[in-house]
Image (cartoon, helix red, strand yellow):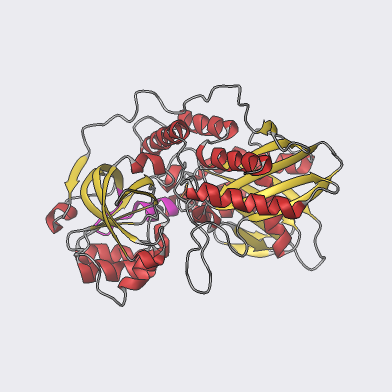
């Protein structure tokens, strides 16, 4: 018989994965109001909004990367934390079984996926005691890998590209924060929110930076110096022009929360925890005797969830280019950066394990004219088949060492991913006649609906997210951000935003 504590934590996990908190929704709504209709950023935000609504309506994962579950628990003195830990772990395993979390816990030595999100270090649970005998507080954040990879840590003083010297001062800290957001570009699914820690050591700095993400986006820092710094960052950062998904635009950041810890005299670290727009964090306060939920944190369950998207949905412009696989070289060479495409036909997922495998093995399918989708979907078994329940793109840059070779060797004509790729891939696209298509990171529910069938799966030994899924796409929308003529929107935005970064740094 499941305990009340298990049930309460399970509700928290499911709600956190599927329903964006009201303060984040409000910030995203404000971002939508700041982009010119019809721009790349505005279109990306429309897709994000539809995705957020679809996730809440269908209780599906907002993003297929359901992240590293990190709990902050406050208990009365004497409460049994060992039992709570056991039940939190059981709730995580159950949420994974129900498809609300993707199996995300990978053995770092063997590469094997544990399948239930449990293993050494997963989930992360921090306990603290408090002087409140009647209540237990449980807060949860689900922070995905794409944005986690965009965390940065600086050791001052140092020289920063485009910003010059960052000293051990508030001005030096400001430069580090500006640099961190610029450096992330679209790879962490901008617009993001950052938690920052000034000081501490390398370990406590990152922990405290992540803890800042438990603050609401609209709060005001009680420390006057930090409040001013937060306001200064938010007042200038959006001039960067990175924009949603790094497509360019007026909003690059929706929140900046800064804390400080004492440091050793010899060290001055600035740690930045970058979270994506899919900023999933919620909490509950439980009755310490019954373990029932007394109230929710960050959301009011009595208030109806206000839809984020315009109810007319995504409007087509008529300028979209319909593509059906297998693609020809001529078709692909006719595409230019900025074109919006609707892809139909077969596509194959491939992430880190598949790309590494293909460097020394033949592919399990014929990839000529084919599309590789950088995606680790959430997939549910249905009878003898499978159904994709969440399937947004993963960060493509990880495949940079492999992608050009794979395109050339196997005749791949298009790669779908997010955040863009580097110079080696760009040269490979030009040489072989292929394109890079940027989908909207995190829009897992939206894209799951553009996958009409799972034909098969190969390389299942790599685990569900890393296997090669054979998908049938129907009008899967994406934007050409790297074409077969040597053009890259990502390079252009990075250069333009570097110039802005230098200007903001001076002001
Ligand atoms: S929205 Fe992007 S960065 Fe965030 S968890 Fe999803 S894929 Fe990762």
**Quadrant location of the C terminus in the rendered image:** top right
**Residue 236 in view, yes or no:** no
Would residue 483 be counted in the magenta stretch?
Answer: yes
Q: Relative to residue 196, is residue 29 drawn left or right?
A: left
Q: Is residue 71 above or below residue 267?
A: above
Between residues 46 and 235, which one lies in front from this camera angle? 46
Please identify the quarter of the rendering in which residue 229 is found. Answer: top right
Q: Is residue 378 above or below residue 432?
A: above
Query: At 42% across and 37% down in the image, what residue appears?
Result: 48
Query: At 25% across and 66% down in the image, what residue appears?
Result: 407
Residue 278: percent from the left, percent from the top?
51, 43
Residue 271: percent from the left, percent from the top?
66, 57
> Going by the picture, which residue comes out furthest to the bottom?
360
Would residue 25 be counted in the magenta stretch?
Answer: no
Disc count in the image?
0
Query: At 65% across and 62% down in the image, what residue appears?
Result: 154
> Going by the picture, which residue comes out furthest to the front?
1
Between residues 404 and 132, which one lies in front from this camera angle? 132
Q: Relative to residue 325, is residue 41 drawn left or right?
A: right
**Quadrant location of the N terminus in the rendered image:** top right
**Residue 40 in view, yes or no:** yes
Q: Specify start and end residues of the magenta stretch as a single range.
A: 480-494
Residue 129: percent from the left, percent from the top?
82, 48
Query: At 35% across and 43% down in the image, what residue appears?
Result: 448
Residue 71: percent from the left, percent from the top?
66, 49
């Amino acid at each position: 018989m499941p305990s009340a504590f298990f049930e309460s934590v399970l509700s928290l996990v499911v709600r956190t994965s599927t329903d964006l908190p009201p303060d984040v929704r409000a910030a995203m709504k404000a971002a939508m109001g700041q982009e010119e209709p019809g721009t790349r950023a505005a279109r990306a935000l429309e897709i994000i909004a539809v995705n957020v609504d679809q996730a809440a309506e269908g209780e599906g994962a907002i993003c297929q990367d359901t992240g590293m579950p990190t709990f902050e628990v406050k208990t009365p003195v004497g409460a049994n934390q060992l039992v709570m830990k056991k039940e939190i772990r059981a709730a995580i395993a159950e949420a994974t079984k129900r498809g609300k979390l993707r199996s995300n816990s990978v053995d770092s030595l063997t590469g094997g996926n544990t399948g239930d999100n449990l293993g050494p270090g997963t989930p992360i649970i921090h306990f603290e005691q408090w002087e409140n005998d009647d209540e237990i507080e449980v807060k949860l954040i689900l922070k995905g890998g794409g944005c986690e990879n965009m965390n940065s840590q600086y050791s001052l003083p140092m020289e920063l590209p485009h910003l010059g010297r960052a000293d051990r001062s508030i001005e030096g800290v400001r430069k580090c924060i500006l640099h961190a957001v610029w450096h992330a570009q679209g790879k962490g699914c901008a617009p993001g929110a950052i938690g920052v820690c000034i000081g501490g050591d390398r370990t406590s700095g990152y922990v405290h930076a992540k803890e800042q993400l438990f603050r609401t986006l609209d709060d005001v820092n009680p420390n006057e110096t930090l409040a001013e710094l937060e306001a200064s960052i938010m007042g200038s950062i959006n001039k960067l022009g990175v924009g949603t998904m790094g497509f360019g635009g007026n909003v690059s950041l929706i929140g900046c929360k800064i804390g400080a810890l004492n440091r050793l005299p010899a060290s001055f670290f600035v740690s930045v925890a970058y979270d994506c727009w899919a900023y999933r964090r919620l909490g509950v306060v439980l009755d310490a005797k019954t373990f029932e939920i007394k109230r929710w944190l960050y959301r009011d369950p009595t208030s109806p969830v206000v839809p984020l998207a315009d109810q007319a949905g995504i409007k087509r412009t008529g300028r979209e280019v319909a593509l059906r696989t297998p693609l020809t070289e001529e078709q692909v060479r006719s595409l230019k950066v900025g074109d919006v495409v609707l892809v139909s036909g077969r596509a194959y997922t491939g992430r880190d394990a598949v790309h590494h495998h293909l460097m020394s093995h033949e592919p399990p399918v014929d990839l000529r004219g084919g599309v590789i989708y950088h995606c680790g979907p959430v997939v549910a078994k249905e009878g003898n088949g499978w159904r994709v329940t969440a399937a947004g793109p993963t960060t493509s840059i990880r495949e940079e060492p492999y992608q050009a070779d794979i395109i050339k060797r196997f005749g791949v004509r298009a790669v779908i991913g997010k955040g863009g790729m580097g110079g080696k891939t760009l040269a490979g696209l030009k040489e072989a006649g292929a394109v890079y298509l940027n989908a909207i990171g995190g829009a897992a529910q939206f894209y799951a609906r553009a996958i009409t069938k799972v034909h098969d799966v190969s390389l299942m030994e790599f685990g569900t997210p890393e296997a090669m899924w054979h998908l049938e796409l129907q009008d899967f929308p994406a934007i050409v951000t790297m074409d077969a003529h040597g053009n890259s929107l990502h390079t252009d935005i990075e250069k333009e935003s570097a110039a802005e970064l230098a200007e903001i740094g001076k002001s």
